[in-house]
Image (cartoon, coloured by chain):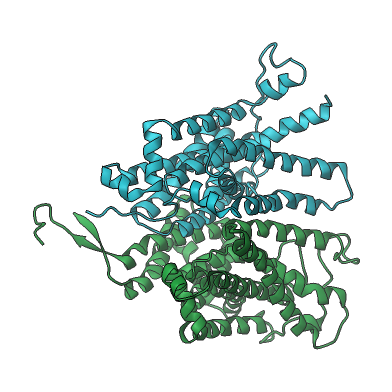
Chain colours: A cyan, B green
Amino acid sequence: MNELLIASMMTMMTAATPLVFAATGELVCEKSGVLNLGVEGMMLIGAVFGFAAVTLTGQPLAGLLAGSLCGLVAALIFALLTLTLLSNQVATGLALTIFGTGLSALVGLDYVGETIEQIRSIHIPVLSDLPVIGRLLFGHDPLVYLAIIILALSGWFLKPTRWGMILRAVGDSEVSAHAIGYPVIAIRYAAVAFGGAMAGLGGAYLSLVYTPLWAENMTAGRGWIALALVVFASWRPSRVLLGAILFGGITILQLNAQAAGLGIPGAFMSMLPYIATIVVLVLISRDAIRIRLNAPACLGKPFRAER
Amino acid sequence: MLALEARATQSASAAWLSPLLAMALTGLTGAAIFLAMGKAPGIALYIYFIEPLTSWSGLSEVAVKAGPLILIGIGLSVGFRAGIWNIGAEGQFIAGAVLGSAPAVVFYDSTNLLILPTMLVLGVLGGMAWAAIPALLKTRFNANEILVSLMLVYVAELLLVHLVQGPWRNPQGWGFPGTRMFPDAALLPMLFPGYRVHLGTLIALLIPLLAWFVLTKSRFGFKVRVFGSAPLAARHAGINNPRMIWATLLIGGGLAGLAGIMEAASTIGQLMPKISPGYGFTAIIVAFLGRLHPVGVALAGTAIAVTYIGGEGAQISAGLPKAVTGLFQGIILFYLLAFDLLTRYRLTRIGNKVSAT
């Protein structure tokens, strides 16, 4: 197979990975009935603190931990406001994105132009050396696999496990879940925190592996695309991977097309991922019944336990 | 122990108190941030929040920045009241600036006095056209207006970059991205010599009055309020869902587009790759801070404009990064949303033993 094609498919996975992280987190969060529009902000926070941690310690693992931890803390601010103080989830999510954009720009000032060592791809003797599929299956950086593993585990968690079913019950009928005696608010806190940690990890992946550098607003709408991916996946984890690879593919395709110079202005090529998001949303959403059947019934509604 | 008790009706005094509390606490938080950055908090806060108001030129700059924030904020607040979440005003602002600038770019040596009114009308239409996309996709295909309007921000930004680097680039610009400077006839007149306050600022101040009138005195205003507070009741009363979506998005887009062309045809005087310091997103904060009320939005737009100018001043005189402004904007909204609890609930003290009430 063509060397360029293999290379493109490899980078496609790296473009998809931050989306897999962020969309998986948001999916679990939404399944519990909470709509967190702050994904973009949490990703930026994860990206900048992850990058700062690697610059300071030289340890990639420290960067990943810092990124997801800071994403989690940011998500807890959101949880405090929406779940304890009962604020509007849409407005609070927007606030989180604005906050994350400002905070990351401020923290990141010292790190613009800094370089770090990229996390290297794995190499398994024999397997990675197989022609074509060797690299495609066994030649990515470890986080690509981590993203897929977390996605698979989330899918498994949500389906048959006891706590997964409770989480879905909380998202589909908070009043009944509360009446049975499940701690609705505590479960939602946990789901929001998980979403934040995953968005932070996705952001850290961008600044530590994908680019690897820090630039203001470097997520460039990926947090919002992750939100669209959850709708695209109809809240089913298995479809998140498909959607993420699709978007990764479009991103890489337009980059390659710009490099090849097809005579189409670069700006129009750069629009493709955003336009594709809109097209996909339209295609999925026009089946209103399917959205209603799959979306968590209590998505976005505040809940306060009556004594 | 403290507990929450739902209020029968929203508390009006708490609704107006919470923005003030939020601003005060943001000031305190700001002081802590400045302290952590090794700056004298008192001086930094003075530069940020007071100094812009101490000179005529400062006030003029605040007014110039407040104009677009108020215009966009008014448009967004109408939508937010009806529960339509247009968060792509930044894109509608750019679309308005682009379409509105077309006459000035094409007839770059025009002296025709009709060019400016034409540009303003086109600016409104450009913003409306950009907002019509989420309206159409929402009403026809049920697509989420939040995500669609936001994606279109990136598309508009890229379109602007393409135009000023390619077809609309100034041939005498030494290859720098940007259009020719607009002819004088295409610029909004300044109000006072030596200051940048212009006719657009005045227009921006009249819009809240108009909006207040429409929202409180007209049938449309009543429908918007009913639609937002009780969608089901609205549907039974025959208030049409798609029409409401169209109306609020077009109003928001039109006002953002007007803000865009007025910005291009005044202080900037041309199109450049970046024409907005995030007005469209900041206006979301302005709308909430102003309680989605026209007068409140005008006040909030002015207050936030002060921090923009203060941020610029702080960058020059105290070496504080401009990014602090963005952080403040996020924090102020957090505090506001937290305090809003008190408009819907009241804190009551319940004793551990005394529950016999």
Residue A10 position by quadrant: top right
* Residue at 68% over, 52% down: A279
- Residue B323: x %, y % from top left: 57, 56
Q: Nearer the viewer, residue A46 or A123?
A: A123
Tag count: 0
Left or right position of B162 against A162: right
* Residue at 76% over, 71% down: B99
- Residue B13: x %, y % from top left: 33, 75
Left or right position of A29 against B55: left
Left or right position of B104 against B27: right
- Residue A198: x %, y % from top left: 51, 38
Quadrant holding the C terminus of chain B: bottom left
Quadrant holding the N terminus of chain B: bottom left
Question: Is the residue B285 above or below the residue B158 in the image?
Answer: below
Left or right position of A226 against A93: right
- Residue B169: x %, y % from top left: 85, 64
* Residue at 39% over, 54% down: A81
Q: Nearer the viewer, residue B329 or B115?
A: B115
Q: Is residue B265 visible?
A: yes
Q: Is residue A59 visible?
A: no
Q: Nearer the viewer, residue B21 or B281?
A: B281
